[in-house]
Amino acid sequence: MKSAWFPLMPENRSNLLLAAILLAMVMGCVFRSDRETMSRPESSELPVASASPVTAQPTPESPTKKPDAGDFVVEQQDLSVARFQRLDNQVKTEKMLEKAADRLNQALILPHDILIRARSCGEQNAFYDAKDRSVTVCFEMMERFHGVFRAGGESEERAYEKMFDAMRFVFLHEVGHALIDAYKLPVAGNEEDAADRLAAYVNLTELGEDGVKAVYAASDAFNLEAKQSASAKRKFADEHLLNEQRFYTSLCMIYGSDASKHARIVDAGYLPKERAVRCRNEYQRTVESWRSLLEPWRKR
């Protein structure tokens, strides 16, 4: 089982820089509500980082680089809840957070330190806290995702594997909030949606098959949670989009990254054709926008 959140990236310098910068980032239209969890294409059908047919517009002349005054810093936490021993051991033994911080620090200029941690929070959540400039991934959210996949019919080990895939997406999402805050980036729209798109983009373009698996796992989690909580009261005032919307947006990013390789998403009816025809442009706008916004903060 490949559980590490951030596998080694390509040696190509520009890809490494963009991938680490965009680690921004713990856990549509009409969709047939009775459809089961989406099956991913076989691994042979999945694109590698260089497979995307979308060609972004050239980045304008690089602005003056900012001073580098900080790092991503892992803050170790003592385990406070015994049932999370397996998760805590794996995160620490495989040095998941340390590897993520190292890749970020190789490529990112920061105006201040940003803490990253995994711990028991007493709630099912993952979040960025602007007060102490920290990204926290909660074991309770990992546990919830595992339960969602088990309830969706996955085996114990398969649910555990998919949980870690989905948590890669969640972690990138939260780091996205941290970068938006640290760089005081403009966000013309819903910041939660922007962080979702950023997490999807870096997974799809820079992390190869593991990244594609992460976005598929996240989309499955959104879809299953929507079904499993169908009778619950909708939180329309919440800043996050509804799970159904996050599901379609994730699929749209996958499809837009390479329509020919991911045609099954549309052919099987998971993503409506009315939305699919716009996905390539949605994906390309995401690429161009984030590259432009983050250019001053990239290390050379």
Image (cartoon, rainbow, N blue to C red):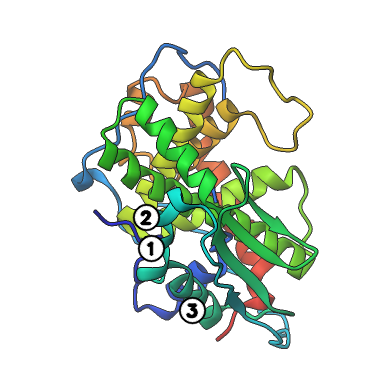
C-beta proximity under 8 Å, tags 2 and 1:
yes
SS class of the residue under badge 1?
helix
Q: Nearer the viewer, mark 3 or mark 1?
A: 1
CA–CA distance in space, label 3 to label 1: 20 Å
- Where residue 217 sits: x, y (%)? 40, 41
Bin the neighbour count of mark 3 within 10 Å (Cα to Cα): few under 14, some 14-19, many 20 and up.
some
- Where residue 250 sits: x, y (%)? 50, 39
N-terminal label among 3 and 1? 1
CA–CA distance in space, label 3 to label 2: 24 Å
Bin the neighbour count of mark 2 within 10 Å (Cα to Cα): few under 14, some 14-19, many 20 and up.
few
Q: Is residue 51 visible?
A: no
Q: Which residue is label 3 attached to?
A: 102
When the figure is inspected, residue 160 is found, relative to residue 274, above or below; the finding is below
Asked whether 260 or 69 is in front, the reply is: 69
* Rendered residue at 58%/47% (across/down): 197
Q: Which mark is residue 89?
A: 1
Bin the neighbour count of mark 1 within 10 Å (Cα to Cα): few under 14, some 14-19, many 20 and up.
few
Q: Quadrant of residue 300?
A: bottom right
Q: Which residue is label 2 attached to?
A: 86
